[in-house]
Amino acid sequence: MRIKVCGLTRQSDVDAAARLGASFCGFIFHPASPRYISPAAAAALESGGMARVGVFVGHGATEILAIMAEARLDYAQLHGGHDRASAERIGPSRVIRVLWPERYAGRAELAADMAAHAESCALFLLEAGQAGGGSGRPQDWTRLAGLASPRPWLLAGGLNALNVASAVASCAPDGLDFNSGVEEAPGKKSPELLAAALAAAAGNLGEKP
């Protein structure tokens, strides 16, 4: 199970994510976000063995590549409706493609769009809401049960210690993205909430056959 902790702005929170076994740490470069961090500030945060992910909304491929270099990023998470040409320029092995299941009439339509983007990304992230950044609320996980994805996918949207076990049981994602559900304030993670959420996720996985 891949675990991503997103919206990080402080070294103490990055350290907590690493200590708890997260695979990815996420930095948001969308200026309108309350969790915005500058590329220089992100570059100064040490992340150990975690893969570094940048969240991009209104940036073009040239700017994304420049920020990736400055902030020492491994992946670009594309929230802004970027076309496949932009993803290919960034490099498919470095792209996390965000899709919003609520935009689709059903699972078949979502799966078709995933297939269309599969060659230009390494991972998918399925977000709650309809567009843009994270909505901070859960989505209907049952709509994703049995989803046939051509790439590993992360589930996002209001995940926390109280609901993550149900989310995993409902749709069996390849990974989880935690953000607002483990915060004490925007951009400031709670070590206690984060530890509880990751423990709940791990406990649920341990119960699966």
Image (cartoon, rainbow, N blue to C red):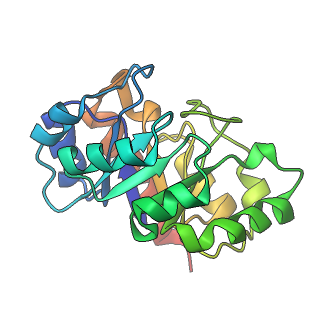
Left or right, residue 7 beside residue 146 = left
Q: Where residue 95 appears, x then y in whole percent?
A: 45, 60
Task: From the viewer's side, name the closer residue of 79 and 26.
Answer: 79
Residue 16: image quadrant is top left
Counting the numbered discs, the total is 0
Residue at position x 39%, y 64% from top? 94
In the depicted structure, whether residue 148 falls above or below residue 42: below
Residue 3, percent from left and from top: 39, 57
Indicate the quadrant containing the C terminus: top left, top right, bottom left or bottom right.
Answer: bottom right
On the rendered structure, is 45 left or right of 54?
left
The furthest residue to the bottom = 209
Q: Nearer the viewer, residue 1 or 111?
A: 111
* x, y percent for residue 30: 42, 29
In which image quadrant can residue 24 be found? Answer: bottom left
Q: In the image, is 65 to the left or to the right of 80? A: left
Q: Is residue 27 above or below residue 3?
A: above
Please tell me which residue is depicted at 14% across the width and 35% down the height of the picture. 12
Q: Is residue 154 visible?
A: no
Residue 127, can we see it? yes
Q: Nearer the viewer, residue 191 or 27?
A: 27
Compared with 207, 55 (above or below) is above
In the rendering, at what x and y percent does residue 28 appear?
A: 37, 35
Looking at the picture, does residue 120 appear above or below residue 106? below
Q: Quadrant of the N terminus?
A: bottom left
Q: Residue at x 39, y 22 (%)?
A: 31
Residue drawn where x is 58% and y is 74% of the image: 119
In the picture, measured across the screen, residue 205 lies left or right of residue 163, that is left
